[in-house]
Image (tube, rainbow, N blue to C red):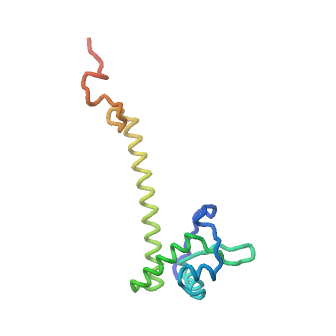
Amino acid sequence: MPEKFERYDSESPSLRGVYGISVAAELSGFGVAALRLYEDYGLITPGRTDGGTRRYSDYDLTRLRRIAELIEAGVNLVGIGRVLDLEHRTDELERHNRRLQADNAQLRAEQDPETSTDHTSTAGNPGIGKREHH
């Protein structure tokens, strides 16, 4: 079986488990047994109450919709686990790449203010901002 899916920040409203298993089954179109099976395969990881009752979040329901799409496309459960993991990793890498690009742009702006995206740059007027040599 694939590794268990790691939960994100459980304080986020979309990640807070609010639906019981029967409600999640109804909202997702899957049966209760299917939800338990998907949990066994690590495809979903619902939250748990102190008493151990499963609580599904909006994020879990979105993930179940993606699972339904992949099942419809003919992907088996192990394959679905791989696809979901790769999609998650891709999302993380894209977020990291955007942060690096923003950091890079900021460093470039600090290094050379004339190439900054700041519209107060004097690059368009060669007489402004240059020192006269005597």
Q: Which of 50 and 16 is in front in this view?
A: 16
Against 9, is 52 above or below?
A: below
Name the quadrant containing residue 13. Answer: bottom right
Task: Name the residue located 57 percent from the left edge and 87 percent from the top edge.
Answer: 31
**Number of marks:** 0
Task: Name the residue located 64 percent from the left edge and 75 percent from the top edge.
Answer: 19
| Residue extending farthest top | 134
x and y, in percent, of residue 108 in the image? 37, 39
Name the quadrant containing residue 105. Answer: top left
| Residue extending farthest left | 126
x and y, in percent, of residue 63 in the image? 51, 74
Q: Which of 76 and 32 is in front in this view?
A: 32
x and y, in percent, of residue 65 in the image? 49, 77
Q: Nearer the viewer, residue 128 or 29?
A: 29
Q: In this view, does 129 lie to the left or right of 50?
A: left
x and y, in percent, of residue 79 in the image? 44, 81
Task: Name the residue located 48 percent from the left edge and 79 percent from the top edge.
Answer: 67
Q: In which quadrant will I find the C terminus? A: top left
Q: In this view, does 98 lie to the left or right of 26?
A: left
Against 95, is 3 above or below?
A: below
